[in-house]
Image (cartoon, rainbow, N blue to C red):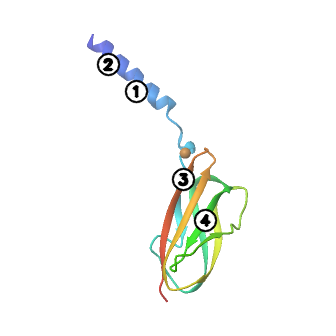
Amino acid sequence: MATKLLRAHLFLLFALIAFWPPPAAAHAIVVASSPAQGQRLAQGECKIELRFNSRIDRARSRLVLMRPDGSSEALGLKETGVGESLEADAKGLQKGSHRLLWQALGVDGHVTHGEILFEVDR
Ligand SMILES: [Cu+2]
């Protein structure tokens, strides 16, 4: 009786492992960024690069910069097509707190988003 139950549980466990989505199907998340979270920058221009853990469809992904004055700007992406990064140039940076909002469509079909905060202080 107990053995039968154990066997049923083992079968369920095996089924779970066997049909679990492989790592390649994970949502797109940022693994590295420039600027980094909380980084301090000088006024003027800055190159933005977000690297993801998986491939994303850039045509359906975007970067929006929120400036200290409350205005926001959708940044033009340098690269198109499918890839593992989003790159853009931010210009006219003034002193204050900035938020870089990102949204990405992973090749697994899932949309993810997040934000990177950085400071312009000199
Ligand atoms: Cu996903």
Image quadrant for the N terminus? Answer: top left
Of mark 3 and mark 4, the one earlier in the sequence is 4
Marks 2,4: beta carbons within 8 A = no
Residue 83 position in % (x across, y down): 67, 56
Q: Which residue is mark 1?
A: 13
Inspect the image, locate mark 3, and give the three-letter code of the amino acid beneath it.
Thr
Q: Hey, which quadrant is residue 38 in on the image?
A: bottom left
Q: Hey, which quadrant is residue 52 in on the image?
A: bottom right
Instruction: Classify residue 17 as left or right of residue 112.
Output: left
Inspect the image, locate mark 4, and give the three-letter code of the amino acid beneath it.
Leu
Q: Which residue is mark 2?
A: 6
Label 1 vs label 4, nearer the camera: 4
Q: Residues within 10 Å of mark 2 (few under 14, many from 20)?
A: few
Q: Which residue is mark 3?
A: 112
Q: Secondary structure at mark 3?
A: strand
Q: Disc 3 and disc 4: Cα gap in Å?
A: 12 Å
Q: Which residue is mark 4?
A: 63
Q: Disc 1 and disc 2: Cα gap in Å?
A: 10 Å
Q: Residues within 10 Å of mark 3 (few under 14, many from 20)?
A: some
Instruction: Please name the residue shown 61% across and 52% down the image.
Output: 105
Of mark 2 and mark 4, the one earlier in the sequence is 2
Marks 1,4: beta carbons within 8 A = no
Question: Quick one: which residue is furthest to the front in this view?
Answer: 70
Q: Secondary structure at mark 2?
A: helix
Instruction: Please name the residue shown 56% across and 75% down the image.
Output: 71
Label 2 vs label 3, nearer the camera: 3
Q: Is mark 3 within 8 Å of ligand 1?
A: yes
Q: Secondary structure at mark 1?
A: helix
Label 2 vs label 4, nearer the camera: 4
Of mark 2 and mark 3, the one earlier in the sequence is 2
Dividing the image into four quarters, tell me where ligand 1 lies.
top right
Of mark 1 and mark 4, the one earlier in the sequence is 1
